[in-house]
Amino acid sequence: MAEKVLMKGNEALAEAALRAGCRAFFGYPITPQTELAAYMAKRMPKEGGVYLQAESEISAINMVYGAAGAGARCMTSTSSPGMSLKSEGISYIAGADLPAVIVNVMRGGPGLGGIQPSQSDYWQATRATGHGDFHPIVFAPSTVQEMASSINDAFELADTYRTPVIVLIDGMLGQMMEPVELPEKKEKKAKKPWAVTGHGGKREQNIINSLNLDTPALERMNIERFERYKKIKAKEQRVETYLTEDADLIIVAFGACARVSRTAIDKAREAGIKVGLIRPITLVPFPVDAIEKVVDQTKAFLTVEMNMGQMVEDVRLAVAGRAPVEFFGHTGGIIPTPNEIFEQVEILDKQKGGEA
Amino acid sequence: MAQTKEKVLFERPKSLSDKPFTYCPGCTHGVAHRLIAETLDELDIADRAIGVAPVGCSVLAYEFFNTDMLQAAHGRAPAVATAVKRVHPDAIVFTYQGDGDLASIGTAETVHAATRGENIVVVFINNAIYGMTGGQMAPTSLPGQITQTSPTGRNVETDGYPIRMVEMLSTLDGVALAQRVALDTPAHIREAKRAIKKAFQNQIDGKGYSIIEVMSTCPTNWGLSGTDAIGWLQDNMLPYYPLGVYKDVAAKGDAKEGATDE
C-alpha cells in the first residue's frame, strides 16, 4: 500500500516526477510554479540527478533539449510568461523528436498579467506552443492526486511518441494542499538508441537535429510526425465523465473549473436538472470520443473556463453544430463559483424547455 | 623495379567525415574544423565526444564532424552543451559558434555557461559579419565596417561598439582558459591548434570552461578574394582584437594582454 501524505500540488508533482525517473530538471524562478523548482533543488541531488537553475526560461528549455537529446528523462516547469519564452525551444524539441515534459502552472495574462490562477494559456498549449507544424500532448490534471499520477503518464507518452508533453495546471492546483497517494518508484528505463552519448567507436554518429534543407525530406518528416499524432488521437484521449448517462445538458471543464462545476452539477441534480460533466484529462488529444458519445442526447453544452473562452472552440469543433455550445468564465485570477455555474445551468435548462 | 617507400605526410583526420564542406572558397571554417578534428584524434576522445552545432554558416557542422552531434537553436549552444555535459560527465562536449550566435543572440547563454564554469570547450569563430544570411552587421563588426545593414559603415554613435568577448569572459571566475587565435598564417594556425588542444585537455582534466576565439575570414561577404581577406583580417581585425591568452588558470600567471607566440 502506497503512503498517503498531505502535499502542495507543485510539490506532489515534483516528487512524482522523481519517482517516475526524472533525472534532470532545469528551471527559472517564476510565480506560481516556484515550489516545484524549490522541491527539485532539494531532492534531485539526493537522487543523483541534475538540478540546475538556468539564467532564463530560454536557456532552461534549451537545457531540456540537450538533456533529452542526451537520453535523460528530463523536465522543466514555469508559469505563463515563462512559457512564451520556452516556445522556441519546444518547437526545436518537437522538430528533433525529443521526449520532454514541460509544466506550465498558469497565471493570468496577457503580458505580466497577474499571479492568480488562470487557464488563459489553453490556446498557447494546444495551438501555438511554438513555430511550425506540430503540437505537443497536453495533460490537464484537476486534483493534487492527479498531478502526481499523470506525470508518469506524461513521461511515458513523451518517450513512446518522442514528443514534448505539456502538463497544464491552473495556479490554484499548484498552490493547494490535498492528501495524495504518491506513486511507487519506477526503475524501468526506455531504450534510446538515438541519443547522443558518444558513439564509443561502436556505431555511426547520432545527430539530434530539426534542420532539413531537402524540402521533400522535410515534408516527409512532417507527415510522419502527423501520423504519430493520429495514433495519439486514436489511443491516448483521457477523460473523466460524471453523471453523463442520462444528462441532456453537459458541462465541459478542466482543471480547477471541473471541480467547481462538479459541485454545481450536484446542486442542479438536487433541483431536478439532468446535467453531467465531461472533464478532459488530455487537452491534446482532445476527448472528442467522449463528446461524440453524448452529443445526440445533449440539448446544450456549457464550457466553464478561467479565460475569455478558449476550450469552447474545441467543444464546438467536436459538437459540429449539432447542439448549442455556450461559454461561461472568469479571468484575472477569479475562480467561477458553484452558484454562478448553477445559474448558467438553470438558464440553459429553461432555454432547452422553451425549445421543446 | 625498386619499391617506392610511401610515407603519409598529411591526411583527413578520422573525426572529420568525407562529406565535402559547404563553406565558400577561401573561408577559414575548414581549417578550424580540421584543427578540432585533429585534436579529437590526437587526444583519442572522438568516441566520447559530443559536439553542438550553432545556427549560422556552420549549422551543418554535424555533417562534418562524425562524432555524436546536436544542432542547437540560434545562440543556445552553451545551454544545450551544459545539459549534455551534466547528463554525461565523462563525455567531451564542445560547441562551435559564430559571432552572431555567440556574441549577440546567445550572449546570455555564453556568459552564464562561462560563469558557472561548465567543463566544456567553446570554439568561437569571429569573422565580424553574419555570413549565412548574406553579410549583415555582427556584434563584432568593426567601427566603420560596411555591411548590408551598415551600408555607410558601422557608426558607433548609433550601432554601438564591437564586443571583445574573450576579454569580457576572462573577468569571470568560472573561466579556465580564454584565448584569441587567428587563422591567417601557418604560425598562427599552429598556435590555434595548440590553444584548441589545451582547451580540450582542460576538459579532460576537469579544469572547467575554455573558450578559444578564432579570428576568421568571410571572403564572400567581405567582397574580397581569399588572399585579400587574409590581408583585411591582419590589417583591420587583429589591431582591434589582439591575439593572446587572456586567462589561463593552468599557467603560472594570467597574461592580460599581448600575443604569446611560444
Image (tube, coloured by chain):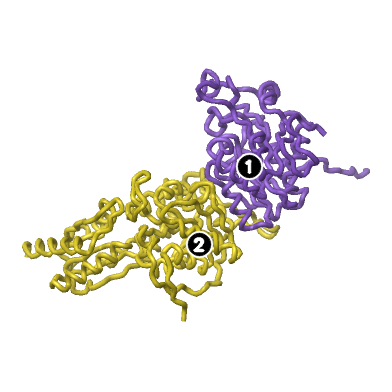
Chain colours: A yellow, B purple
| Residue type indicated by callout 2 | Tyr
* Few, some or many residues within 10 Å of mark 1 (<14, 14–19, 20+): many
> Taking A28 as reference, is A240 above or below it?
below
Q: Give the alpha-carbon distance from disc 1 to disc 2, as whole Å.
A: 35 Å
In the image shown, does A46 or B100 lie closer to the viewer? A46
Residue A63: horizontal and vertical position, in percent?
Answer: 55, 52
| Circle count | 2
Tag 2 secondary structure = helix
Find residue A127 and report its horizontal and vertical position in percent: 35, 51
- Residue at 26% x, 72% y is A242
On screen, residue A109 above or below A189: above
Tell us which disc is closer to us: 1 or 2.
2
Q: Residue furthest bottom?
A: A1
Q: In this image, A329 relative to B32: left or right?
A: left
CA neighbours of label 2 inside 10 A, class few (<14), some (14 to 19), many (20+): some
Q: Residue at x 34, y 65 (%)?
A: A142
- Identify residue for label 1: B96
**Residue A122 seen anywhere in this rendered image of the structure:** yes
Q: Position of residue A319 (x, y in %)?
A: 22, 60
The subunit carrying tag 2 is: A
Q: Disc 1: which chain?
A: B
Residue appearing at x 26%, y 53% in the figure = A309
Residue B35 position within the rendered picture, expressed as x and y whole percent measured from the top left: 73, 40
Q: Amino acid at mark 1?
A: Tyr
- Relative placement, left or right, of A216 versus A47 is left
Please determine whether, in this image, residue B209 is positioned above or below residue A252.
above
Q: Nearer the viewer, residue A55 or A61?
A: A55
Q: Are marks 1 and 2 in contact (CB under 8 Å)?
A: no
Instruction: Choose top left, top right, bottom left or bottom right for residue A275.
Output: bottom left
The answer to whether dots 1 and 2 both sit on one chain is no
Label 2 belongs to which residue? Answer: A39
Residue drawn where x is 34% and y is 54% of the image: A116
